[in-house]
Image: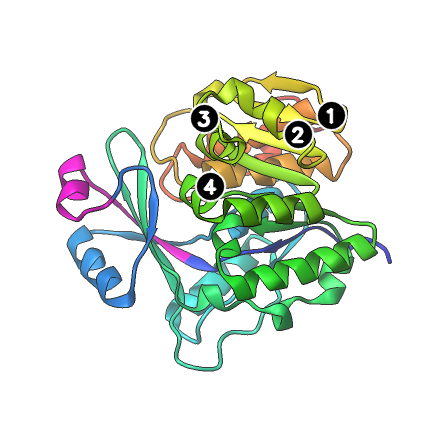
Amino acid sequence: MPETKDLAAVGNAIVDVLAHCDDDFLVANDIPKGGMVLIGAEHALNIYKAMGETTEIAGGSAANSTACLASLGGSAAFIGKVGQDRLGEAFRQSLEDTGVSFVTEPMTDHTPTGRCLINVTPDAERSMMTFIGAAEHVSEADIDETVIASAAVTYFEGYLFEQPVARAAMVKACEIAKANGRKTAITLSDSGCVERQKSNFLSFITEHVDIVFANEEEAKMLADTLVFDDAPKLLNGLAPYLALTRSEKGSVVVGPDGTAEAVEAIKPAQLVDTTGAGDGYAGGFLYGFVRDMPLATCASLGSLAASEVISHMGPRPQQSLANLARDHGLIS
């Protein structure tokens, strides 16, 4: 079957609600700085009211990655669940406006679309409280075999991995991808996810995954080490490819030969909001990966996408990543 997409992503369909705040606001509302916690509908409403002036942007980790890949000139499809409501339609339209196909039918009941309340402190750190809503209801029935079979890489979001029904859907997608000679990838999403799901992550990655994306804390948690420099060695062989990000310290990539290579970060024009940095990195990396670029080039494309994303509020690029990549000599 000919490849019709670079990427098929399976993840949470979430609308990001962003606001600036100070550290006192985080303390007063019991929001863990730099982390992500799940909350219920009533709690979400209360925090939303307390946030004051907000910006609403379609988000979701894996969906953000597809948008970045599309901005580089790639093609992608997204599998995720929204409700039949205003935010669900806004999410769908926003994603399709980037050129990404949204192939999943909405919920048929009154389950609302998920939203992530993101409070950004002056140091640009984002602290997230997420009401999952419809997003957690991705199931095996939503896995489109044609889409998965024809995508070069199928990419999974660690946040969604925590839901057992969604995890079964991911296994089904992996089986389809492998049967058609395609690759699979996963982002670990959050160190809390890794702590809660470590054994499940290890089993799933070992059995099904070709590429693992993790930030410094996630990598240390998965490798069971306090020292990042030990993580690439301890995780070597878990999957054929590792891409471990370190914010301003760049990233470390490891290929099937086991050699770890450090790649420098690309400094943003200004640091405004780190929301979506890892998502941008994955989107840029995968754009290069499906085109058989060297891993270091893939990492540089990822760093470039992350750099653009963190230079403004919101998790998706506001200028053409393809043009930026050409300016940096990363693509022709």
Is label 3 in contact with label 1 (beta carbons under 8 Å)?
no
Residue 90, visible in the rendered structure: yes
Residue for badge 2: 298
Q: CA distance from mark 3 to mark 1?
A: 21 Å
* Residue for point 73% across, 25% down: 294
Query: For numbered disc 3, what is the local secondary structure?
Result: helix
User: What amino acid type should be assigned to the residue bearing mark 1?
Assistant: Pro
* 3 vs 2, front mark: 3
Q: Nearer the viewer, residue 262 or 87?
A: 262
Q: Nearer the viewer, residue 70 or 276?
A: 276
Q: CA distance from mark 4 to mark 1?
A: 27 Å
Q: Nearer the viewer, residue 198 or 76?
A: 198
User: What amino acid type should be assigned to the residue bearing mark 4?
Assistant: Gln
Query: For numbered disc 4, what is the local secondary structure?
Result: loop
**Residue 14, relative to residue 268: is it above or below?**
below
Residue for badge 4: 318
Residue for badge 1: 294
Query: For numbered disc 1, what is the local secondary structure?
Result: loop
Q: CA distance from mark 2 to mark 4?
A: 21 Å
Q: How is the image coloured?
A: rainbow
User: What amino acid type should be assigned to the residue bearing mark 3?
Assistant: Ser
* Residue for point 48% across, 60% down: 13
- Residue 87, position as x, y percentages in the image: 39, 66
Residue for badge 3: 247
* Residue for point 64% across, 44% down: 205
| Quadrant (top left/top right/bottom left/bottom right) for the C terminus | top right
Q: Residues within 10 Å of mark 3 (few under 14, many from 20)?
A: some
**Residue 142, relative to residue 38: is it above or below?**
below
Is label 2 in contact with label 1 (beta carbons under 8 Å)?
yes
Q: CA distance from mark 3 to mark 4?
A: 20 Å
Q: Which residues are magenta?
A: 15-31
